[in-house]
Amino acid sequence: MNRQLYRQNNSSPAASALFETRRFILVLFSSGMLALAFSPYNLGFLAWFALVPFFIALHNASLRQRCILSFSFAFTFFLATVYWLAHVSLIGFMLLCAYLGLEFSFYSLFFPRLTSRPALFLIPLLWISIEQLRGMMFSGFGWGLLGYTQYKNLTLIQIADITGVWGISYLLAMSNTALSQIFVLRRRTPWNNPAIVVPLLLAAIFYGYGAYCLHLNRQGPDITVSIVQGNIAQEIKWDPDYATAIIEKYRQLSIIAAEEKPDIIIWPETSVPGYLLDEPQLYSSVVELAQRLKTHLLVGSPREDYETRRYYNSVFLFSPDGHLQKFHDKIHLVPFGEYIPYKKILWFLADFPIADFSAGKKHTVFPLPAAGRPNTSFSVLICFEDLFPFLVKRFRDKGAQFLLTVTNEAWFKNSTEPPQHTAISVFRAIENRCWFIRCANTGVSCFIDPKGVIRKKVELSNKDVFVPGIATMRLKD
């Protein structure tokens, strides 16, 4: 596609309309391929060339066309990728996709010509800049990053402990740029072309480093952990008529888990159906269970601070003798789900049924004594907090030897959200070179080792979502 062809195709209104239609077809084809590269479809190989039609569509387009095409690409991609948010709020889901589309339009403002050699480096740099911007602005939504498509490509992604997920995104965006340049320039001697040599060299470095890392022995702390997946439907989760049955279900699963003598048993986010510290019956049932099982018990529950009149999404650690050792409040809240941001501006949302939680301030590290073994420490991410690499790293820097995510994904029904979230957790394990454990209400609950290998899941009849169960693992193994 050269300038002469571009002018020729724009020589009449009919030709111009046809040419724009072709661009939109390329964009839709590109966003569809990219969506299929993510979990649970796991066609990660598509990510190496899925952006080629999109980049070609942007080539030689006007600024207005580039903005519209970029918006269309991002809007349709997120429609296909995070459609499960519609289970919570259809309007909110559509507004989020539109916002992400507008945000991505900034990409088009700086998109260089594919025929320029700097484009090979600038286009990937622009791509990861937009990814980082998306992960920070307005609370951040770091979902659907290009690098997450490779979570099963363990050799490639080991370099995430240096570059984070953005290093993988950069390589993939460079691969797409190189293929786009080759298509546009149509060079027949590619081996002396930087569009071939540089991506291959970078990929070789990534794979070489990954092969080295996978041969290293990375043991975890000598501790045994059990995770409980209650599989409680969102429709009954906060119904007082079901509170006793919910606690009993977690009790029975925990008794089964205790047979393997774990050092700690973990329940998911808000697993206790009420305010644990304010409801004596709920509190006594958790205390008695910890005493019976003679192990540490970590449970999730909201709490109220009566001095400040604030509410928090929290987790509580009970000792084997039933004493409450420590609690931790969620730091990064879900906007429009757990709180209303910019209340003075969005005052009209005050009457909507949106929770009014406050953000925690402390990066809590829980001590976990074990008889005859060195003490272990861990930290807890709640809900979607593991989307934020820098937040996760702060817990690790505070001394946590392994990390947990406790979450309730029942909101999203039987969708692609749980496996997509699991792929993100794989990167957090590699970036921090520690065990990363997921404990979810409806799935996926699993153990991820420091190399990003998913070692064990809660499963029933080969299903890991919307099934009750337990899984236990010794982290040193």
Image (tube, rainbow, N blue to C red):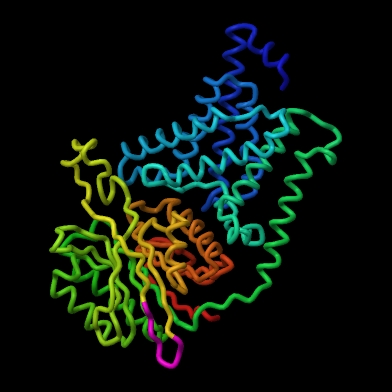
- Please check the rendered image and state whether residue 370 is part of the magenta-colored stretch, yes or no: yes
Q: Is residue 385 above or below residue 325?
A: above
Image: 206 above or below 188: below
Provide residue 403's location: percent of width, then percent of height.
Answer: 44, 69
User: Residue 22 occupies which quadrant of the picture?
Assistant: top right
Q: Position of residue 186 (x, y in %)?
A: 79, 29
Residue 311: in magenta span: no
Q: Residue at x 38, y 38 (%)?
A: 96
Is residue 68 visible in this depiction of the protein? yes
Give the left or right position of residue 133, taking residue 166 as reference.
left
Q: Quadrant of residue 267 in the image?
A: bottom left
The quadrant of the picture occupied by the C terminus is bottom right
Residue positioned 53% across, 81% down in the render: 476
Image point 67% across, 62% down: which residue?
210
From this viewpoint, which residue is outermost toward the bottom? Answer: 372
What residue is rendered at 56% in x and 64% in y? Answer: 430
